[in-house]
Amino acid sequence: MSRRVPLRELAHARAGDKGNTSNVSVWLREPAHFESVRRQLTPERLRAEFPALLRGSIRVFPVPHLAGLNFVMEEALEGGVNGSLGLDGHGKSWSFLILGLEVEV
Amino acid sequence: LLYEVHDPGRYLTPDVTADFSRVEIAAEAPDRIAVSGAAGGPRPDQLKVTLACDGGFLAEGGISYAGPGALARAELARDILRERLGPAPRLDLIGVDSIHGTAGLRTAAEPYEARLRAALRTATREEAELMLWEVEALLCCGPAGGCGYRGAITPSVVTYSTTIDRAAVEPTVTVLVA
């Protein structure tokens, strides 16, 4: 019987920025969850969840042997650290944007 | 491991194209890990460049509301600023929608307090001051119980990223002491 849980229950994450590009690396605590989460957390899913924020291309680089997924999201920081008028121009909290998504386990 | 890294197999540095994709991490002992497997390829022909340009002035001001109806009063204050200042300023409610608001996520429950934050980048200090006057004026001419106004104007720098041929760069170091 599967259930839906916030990704935060299964993973931790770290956000970084380069200009207006955000990268969020997501690391599953249990390697057993990696393939399932990888299938559910696609670039298409991210774009569909946050279309007003994630405006550019989205790529994902898997690191299977460490149960990690690195999401690289262009035009995703409302201008970036020196361009955004928002408080979080680095997108440091984008890690929890991703960790708030629900996945089936 | 992947902080500010895009393709883990191809991270550009001036000296090497680093490959973190096969890094292994093993627990060796309590509070001790072994990291191995980092690799690299030839240094890139292009160097990364950050261009810094004058970004004018950044004005930021805020005013808070607390107690019964705090959110509604803060939202009314935001509507007032929007009507008087037009579309240019970013207007956030801290504690409600200031961080992930663009993504469509905001506080679901009624908060006890909310802070309206206005931010604007301008070419002139006068335009920046005008916005702060509008925020401060909410203390007397806005929704009831507005408090804690703060405002600041800071010169701002905006940056752009690009690359340049390594051959076009001649490294020199200049130290400026104020």
Image (tube, coloured by chain):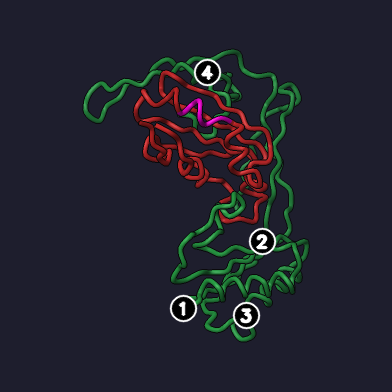
- The spot of residue B61 in percent (x, y) is 61, 69
Q: Earlier in the sequence, mark 3 or mark 2?
A: 2
Query: Which residue is at a point 68% across and 77% down the rendered structure image?
Result: B133
Q: Which mark is residue B90?
A: 2
Q: Which quadrant is the N terminus of chain B positioned in?
A: top left
Q: What is the chain letter for disc 3?
A: B
**Residue type pointed to by label 2:** Arg
Which residue lies under the disc numbered 3? B138
On screen, residue B118 above or below A37: below
Residue at the farthest left position: B30
B106 left or right of A6 in image = right
**Residue type pointed to by label 1:** Pro
Residue at the farthest bottom position: B140
Q: Which chain is green?
A: B
Which residue lies under the disc numbered 1? B68
Please tell me whether mark 1 or mark 3 is closer to you in this view. Answer: 1
Secondary element type, mark 2: strand
Q: Earlier in the sequence, mark 2 or mark 1?
A: 1
Q: Earlier in the sequence, mark 1 or mark 3?
A: 1
Q: Which residues are magenta?
A: A37-42
Distance between the Cα atoms at labels 4 and 2?
40 Å
